[in-house]
Protein backbone atom coordinates (compact mmCIF):
# COMPACT_ATOMS: atom_id res chain seq x y z
CA UNK A 1 0.00 0.00 0.00
CA UNK A 2 1.16 3.54 -0.76
CA UNK A 3 1.96 5.97 2.06
CA UNK A 4 0.11 5.87 5.39
CA UNK A 5 -2.13 2.82 5.62
CA UNK A 6 -4.41 3.35 8.62
CA UNK A 7 -7.99 4.13 7.53
CA UNK A 8 -9.45 7.59 8.16
CA UNK A 9 -13.11 8.55 8.05
CA UNK A 10 -13.91 10.67 5.00
CA UNK A 11 -16.76 13.16 4.68
CA UNK A 12 -18.72 11.95 1.65
CA UNK A 13 -21.13 14.26 -0.22
CA UNK A 14 -22.15 11.53 -2.66
CA UNK A 15 -25.79 11.98 -3.71
CA UNK A 16 -26.17 15.23 -1.75
CA UNK A 17 -27.78 18.45 -2.96
CA UNK A 18 -24.82 20.48 -1.77
CA UNK A 19 -25.03 23.09 -4.49
CA UNK A 20 -28.65 24.03 -3.86
CA UNK A 21 -29.02 23.18 -0.17
CA UNK A 22 -25.86 24.93 1.01
CA UNK A 23 -25.03 27.66 -1.49
CA UNK A 24 -28.51 29.11 -1.97
CA UNK A 25 -28.49 32.40 -0.06
CA UNK A 26 -24.70 32.51 0.31
CA UNK A 27 -23.88 35.09 -2.36
CA UNK A 28 -21.78 37.04 0.15
CA UNK A 29 -19.58 34.08 1.10
CA UNK A 30 -19.08 33.06 -2.53
CA UNK A 31 -18.04 36.54 -3.65
CA UNK A 32 -15.84 37.18 -0.60
CA UNK A 33 -13.97 33.91 -1.20
CA UNK A 34 -13.49 34.77 -4.86
CA UNK A 35 -11.94 38.11 -3.90
CA UNK A 36 -9.47 36.29 -1.63
CA UNK A 37 -8.59 33.74 -4.30
CA UNK A 38 -7.99 36.38 -6.96
CA UNK A 39 -5.40 37.95 -4.67
CA UNK A 40 -3.73 34.67 -3.66
CA UNK A 41 -3.71 32.53 -6.81
CA UNK A 42 -0.62 32.68 -9.03
CA UNK A 43 -1.23 34.64 -12.25
CA UNK A 44 -1.00 31.39 -14.20
CA UNK A 45 0.73 28.04 -14.36
CA UNK A 46 0.96 24.66 -15.98
CA UNK A 47 -1.15 22.28 -13.90
CA UNK A 48 -3.53 23.07 -11.03
CA UNK A 49 -5.44 20.66 -8.82
CA UNK A 50 -8.44 21.75 -6.79
CA UNK A 51 -8.96 19.35 -3.88
CA UNK A 52 -12.62 19.10 -2.94
CA UNK A 53 -13.70 20.82 -6.13
CA UNK A 54 -17.32 19.71 -5.71
CA UNK A 55 -19.58 21.01 -8.46
CA UNK A 56 -16.84 23.25 -9.89
CA UNK A 57 -17.94 26.45 -8.16
CA UNK A 58 -14.52 28.09 -8.48
CA UNK A 59 -13.36 26.58 -11.78
CA UNK A 60 -13.79 29.81 -13.75
CA UNK A 61 -10.93 31.32 -11.70
CA UNK A 62 -8.49 28.80 -13.19
CA UNK A 63 -8.64 30.06 -16.79
CA UNK A 64 -4.93 31.11 -16.80
CA UNK A 65 -3.76 27.52 -16.15
CA UNK A 66 -2.87 25.11 -18.96
CA UNK A 67 -4.37 22.06 -17.22
CA UNK A 68 -6.89 21.80 -14.37
CA UNK A 69 -7.62 18.72 -12.26
CA UNK A 70 -10.90 18.84 -10.36
CA UNK A 71 -10.63 16.24 -7.60
CA UNK A 72 -13.44 15.30 -5.24
CA UNK A 73 -14.52 12.24 -3.26
CA UNK A 74 -18.07 12.59 -4.60
CA UNK A 75 -18.70 11.30 -8.11
CA UNK A 76 -22.16 12.90 -8.17
CA UNK A 77 -20.74 16.37 -7.49
CA UNK A 78 -18.15 15.87 -10.22
CA UNK A 79 -20.97 15.01 -12.63
CA UNK A 80 -22.59 18.32 -11.70
CA UNK A 81 -19.29 20.03 -12.45
CA UNK A 82 -19.20 18.38 -15.88
CA UNK A 83 -22.72 19.63 -16.61
CA UNK A 84 -21.85 23.18 -15.54
CA UNK A 85 -18.47 23.48 -17.25
CA UNK A 86 -19.14 21.64 -20.50
CA UNK A 87 -16.50 20.00 -22.67
CA UNK A 88 -13.33 21.83 -21.67
CA UNK A 89 -10.28 19.83 -22.80
CA UNK A 90 -8.13 21.48 -20.12
CA UNK A 91 -10.14 19.90 -17.28
CA UNK A 92 -9.64 16.39 -15.88
CA UNK A 93 -12.20 15.03 -13.42
CA UNK A 94 -10.90 12.71 -10.70
CA UNK A 95 -12.85 10.92 -7.95
CA UNK A 96 -10.38 10.20 -5.16
CA UNK A 97 -9.40 10.52 -1.52
CA UNK A 98 -7.27 13.49 -0.42
CA UNK A 99 -5.23 11.19 1.83
CA UNK A 100 -4.23 9.00 -1.14
CA UNK A 101 -4.32 11.25 -4.17
CA UNK A 102 -3.80 9.44 -7.48
CA UNK A 103 -1.32 12.07 -8.68
CA UNK A 104 2.38 11.44 -9.17
CA UNK A 105 4.94 13.23 -7.04
CA UNK A 106 5.52 16.87 -8.05
CA UNK A 107 2.76 16.60 -10.67
CA UNK A 108 1.24 20.06 -10.15
CA UNK A 109 2.49 23.59 -9.60
CA UNK A 110 -0.65 24.86 -7.84
CA UNK A 111 -3.04 23.24 -5.36
CA UNK A 112 -6.27 24.82 -4.12
CA UNK A 113 -8.31 23.58 -1.16
CA UNK A 114 -11.33 25.65 -0.06
CA UNK A 115 -14.01 24.52 2.42
CA UNK A 116 -12.34 21.12 2.79
CA UNK A 117 -9.88 21.36 5.70
CA UNK A 118 -12.70 21.56 8.24
CA UNK A 119 -13.79 18.05 7.19
CA UNK A 120 -10.33 16.46 7.60
CA UNK A 121 -9.82 14.28 10.68
CA UNK A 122 -6.08 14.00 9.95
CA UNK A 123 -5.09 17.33 8.45
CA UNK A 124 -1.32 16.79 8.89
CA UNK A 125 -1.54 13.64 6.77
CA UNK A 126 -3.50 15.51 4.09
CA UNK A 127 -0.91 18.31 4.08
CA UNK A 128 1.89 15.77 3.62
CA UNK A 129 0.05 14.36 0.62
CA UNK A 130 -0.49 17.82 -0.87
CA UNK A 131 3.19 18.61 -0.35
CA UNK A 132 4.07 15.38 -2.18
CA UNK A 133 2.10 16.24 -5.34
CA UNK A 134 3.34 19.86 -5.48
CA UNK A 135 6.49 20.60 -7.43
CA UNK A 136 9.40 22.64 -6.16
CA UNK A 137 8.28 26.26 -6.17
CA UNK A 138 4.66 25.11 -6.18
CA UNK A 139 1.91 27.04 -4.40
CA UNK A 140 -0.84 25.88 -2.06
CA UNK A 141 -3.83 28.18 -1.58
CA UNK A 142 -6.04 26.83 1.18
CA UNK A 143 -8.87 27.94 3.45
CA UNK A 144 -9.63 26.77 6.95
CA UNK A 145 -12.34 27.41 9.54
CA UNK A 146 -10.93 29.73 12.18
CA UNK A 147 -11.45 28.62 15.78
CA UNK A 148 -10.46 32.03 17.16
CA UNK A 149 -13.00 34.19 15.34
CA UNK A 150 -14.67 37.18 16.95
CA UNK A 151 -18.07 35.57 17.53
CA UNK A 152 -16.49 32.54 19.25
CA UNK A 153 -14.41 34.81 21.49
CA UNK A 154 -17.52 36.78 22.48
CA UNK A 155 -19.52 33.63 23.27
CA UNK A 156 -16.67 32.21 25.34
CA UNK A 157 -16.15 35.42 27.34
CA UNK A 158 -19.89 35.63 28.01
CA UNK A 159 -19.98 32.01 29.21
CA UNK A 160 -22.16 30.85 26.32
CA UNK A 161 -19.78 28.16 25.01
CA UNK A 162 -17.65 25.69 26.98
CA UNK A 163 -14.64 25.41 24.65
CA UNK A 164 -11.91 28.04 24.48
CA UNK A 165 -11.13 29.70 21.14
CA UNK A 166 -7.63 30.36 22.48
CA UNK A 167 -6.73 26.69 22.94
CA UNK A 168 -4.52 25.66 20.01
CA UNK A 169 -5.89 22.15 19.48
CA UNK A 170 -8.53 21.63 16.74
CA UNK A 171 -12.13 21.54 17.97
CA UNK A 172 -14.60 19.06 16.47
CA UNK A 173 -17.96 20.80 16.89
CA UNK A 174 -19.82 18.10 14.91
CA UNK A 175 -18.77 14.80 13.38
CA UNK A 176 -16.01 15.49 10.83
CA UNK A 177 -16.38 19.26 11.26
CA UNK A 178 -13.33 20.96 12.74
CA UNK A 179 -12.28 24.50 13.63
CA UNK A 180 -8.56 25.30 13.74
CA UNK A 181 -6.48 27.82 15.66
CA UNK A 182 -4.30 29.93 13.31
CA UNK A 183 -1.11 29.19 15.28
CA UNK A 184 -1.77 25.43 15.09
CA UNK A 185 -2.43 25.61 11.35
CA UNK A 186 0.66 27.66 10.60
CA UNK A 187 2.80 25.21 12.59
CA UNK A 188 1.43 22.24 10.63
CA UNK A 189 2.15 23.95 7.29
CA UNK A 190 5.72 24.70 8.30
CA UNK A 191 6.24 21.14 9.56
CA UNK A 192 5.75 19.73 6.07
CA UNK A 193 8.02 22.32 4.46
CA UNK A 194 5.71 25.12 3.35
CA UNK A 195 6.73 28.77 3.54
CA UNK A 196 3.71 30.97 4.30
CA UNK A 197 3.69 33.94 1.93
CA UNK A 198 0.35 35.69 2.43
CA UNK A 199 -2.89 35.35 4.38
CA UNK A 200 -6.33 36.93 4.19
CA UNK A 201 -9.15 36.96 6.76
CA UNK A 202 -12.46 36.32 4.98
CA UNK A 203 -16.22 36.54 5.66
CA UNK A 204 -16.18 39.14 8.44
CA UNK A 205 -19.92 39.72 7.87
CA UNK A 206 -21.15 36.13 8.09
CA UNK A 207 -24.11 37.21 10.20
CA UNK A 208 -27.65 36.25 9.25
CA UNK A 209 -29.46 39.49 10.08
CA UNK A 210 -26.78 41.55 8.30
CA UNK A 211 -26.93 39.44 5.15
CA UNK A 212 -30.73 39.81 5.08
CA UNK A 213 -30.50 43.61 5.09
CA UNK A 214 -27.47 44.38 2.89
CA UNK A 215 -26.83 42.95 -0.60
CA UNK A 216 -24.21 40.23 -0.67
CA UNK A 217 -22.18 42.05 -3.32
CA UNK A 218 -21.91 45.13 -1.09
CA UNK A 219 -20.85 43.08 1.93
CA UNK A 220 -18.29 41.19 -0.17
CA UNK A 221 -16.79 44.42 -1.48
CA UNK A 222 -16.32 45.77 2.06
CA UNK A 223 -15.02 42.38 3.20
CA UNK A 224 -12.45 42.54 0.40
CA UNK A 225 -11.13 45.83 1.81
CA UNK A 226 -10.74 44.21 5.24
CA UNK A 227 -9.22 40.88 4.20
CA UNK A 228 -5.57 41.93 4.00
CA UNK A 229 -5.39 44.13 7.14
CA UNK A 230 -7.67 41.67 8.96
CA UNK A 231 -5.12 38.89 8.40
CA UNK A 232 -3.01 40.40 11.18
CA UNK A 233 -5.70 39.81 13.83
CA UNK A 234 -7.38 36.79 12.22
CA UNK A 235 -10.81 37.34 13.80
CA UNK A 236 -12.88 36.31 10.75
CA UNK A 237 -14.47 32.83 10.51
CA UNK A 238 -12.39 31.84 7.46
CA UNK A 239 -8.66 32.25 6.91
CA UNK A 240 -7.08 31.90 3.48
CA UNK A 241 -3.37 31.06 3.23
CA UNK A 242 -0.92 31.10 0.35
CA UNK A 243 2.10 28.87 1.03
CA UNK A 244 4.98 27.87 -1.23
CA UNK A 245 7.21 24.81 -1.52
CA UNK A 246 10.98 25.37 -1.53
CA UNK A 247 12.96 25.08 -4.72
CA UNK A 248 12.54 26.17 -8.35
CA UNK A 249 9.68 25.24 -10.65
CA UNK A 250 10.45 22.42 -13.13
CA UNK A 251 11.67 23.39 -16.58
CA UNK A 252 9.63 20.58 -18.16
CA UNK A 253 6.48 18.68 -17.18
CA UNK A 254 5.85 14.98 -17.95
CA UNK A 255 2.54 14.31 -19.70
CA UNK A 256 1.69 11.34 -17.45
CA UNK A 257 0.68 12.47 -13.97
CA UNK A 258 -1.39 9.68 -12.43
CA UNK A 259 -0.30 7.45 -9.53
CA UNK A 260 -1.75 4.19 -8.26
CA UNK A 261 -3.25 4.92 -4.82
CA UNK A 262 -2.92 1.25 -3.89
CA UNK A 263 0.75 0.54 -4.54
CA UNK A 264 2.19 3.97 -5.33
CA UNK A 265 3.43 3.20 -8.85
CA UNK A 266 4.00 6.41 -10.83
CA UNK A 267 3.77 8.10 -13.25
CA UNK A 268 0.95 6.27 -14.99
CA UNK A 269 -0.55 7.35 -18.33
CA UNK A 270 -4.28 7.04 -19.00
CA UNK A 271 -5.64 4.64 -21.59
CA UNK A 272 -9.06 3.95 -23.09
CA UNK A 273 -10.16 2.00 -20.01
CA UNK A 274 -8.89 4.55 -17.49
CA UNK A 275 -5.55 4.13 -15.72
CA UNK A 276 -3.92 0.70 -15.58
CA UNK A 277 -1.28 -0.02 -12.95
CA UNK A 278 1.35 -2.51 -14.22
CA UNK A 279 2.68 -3.05 -10.69
CA UNK A 280 -0.48 -4.31 -8.99
CA UNK A 281 -2.66 -5.00 -12.07
CA UNK A 282 -5.45 -2.73 -10.88
CA UNK A 283 -7.50 -0.83 -13.44
CA UNK A 284 -8.85 2.50 -12.25
CA UNK A 285 -11.73 3.05 -14.65
CA UNK A 286 -12.80 6.06 -16.66
CA UNK A 287 -16.56 6.28 -16.08
CA UNK A 288 -18.51 8.91 -18.00
CA UNK A 289 -15.49 11.18 -18.21
CA UNK A 290 -14.48 10.79 -14.55
CA UNK A 291 -11.34 8.90 -13.52
CA UNK A 292 -12.56 6.77 -10.63
CA UNK A 293 -9.85 6.04 -8.08
CA UNK A 294 -12.33 5.02 -5.39
CA UNK A 295 -13.33 1.67 -6.87
CA UNK A 296 -11.04 -0.29 -9.23
CA UNK A 297 -12.58 -2.12 -12.15
Image (cartoon, rainbow, N blue to C red):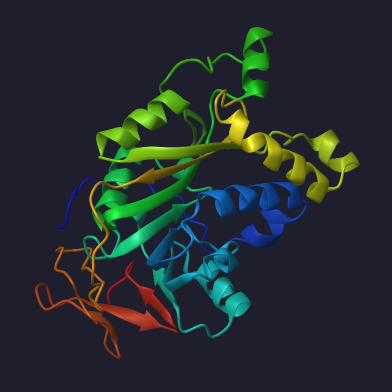
> Is 100 left, or right, of 32 in this rendering?
left
Q: In the orientation shown, which residue stands out farthest toward the left?
A: 279
Q: Quadrant of residue 134?
A: bottom left
> Is 211 left, or right, of 46 in this rendering?
right
The C terminus sits in image quarter: bottom left
Please give the name of the residue rendered at 70% of the width and 52% of the height, measured from the top-left corner: 31
Q: In the orientation shown, which residue stands out farthest toward the right?
A: 213
Q: Is residue 129 above or below residue 174?
A: below
Q: Position of residue 172 (x, y in %)?
A: 48, 30
Work out whether residue 247 or residue 154 is closer to the camera in this orientation and state it.
247
Q: Position of residue 15 (x, y in %)?
A: 56, 65
Residue 176 in sight here: no
Q: Is residue 142 above or below residue 171?
A: below
Q: Is residue 74 above or below residue 242?
A: below
Q: Is residue 236 above or below residue 91?
A: above
Please give the name of the residue rendered at 29% of the width and 47% of the height, measured from the top-left corner: 245
The N terminus sits in image quarter: bottom left
Please give the name of the residue rendered at 76% of the width and 34% of the height, measured from the top-left corner: 207
Amino acid sequence: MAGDTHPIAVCDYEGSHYRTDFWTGREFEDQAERIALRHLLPPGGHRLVEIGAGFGRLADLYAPFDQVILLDYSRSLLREAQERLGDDPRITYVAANVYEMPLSSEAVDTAVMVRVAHHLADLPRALREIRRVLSGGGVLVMEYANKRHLKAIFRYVMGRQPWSPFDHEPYEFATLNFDFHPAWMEARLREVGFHIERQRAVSHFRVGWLKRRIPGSTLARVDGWLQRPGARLKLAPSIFVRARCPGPLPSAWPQAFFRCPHCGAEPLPPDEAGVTCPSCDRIWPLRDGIYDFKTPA
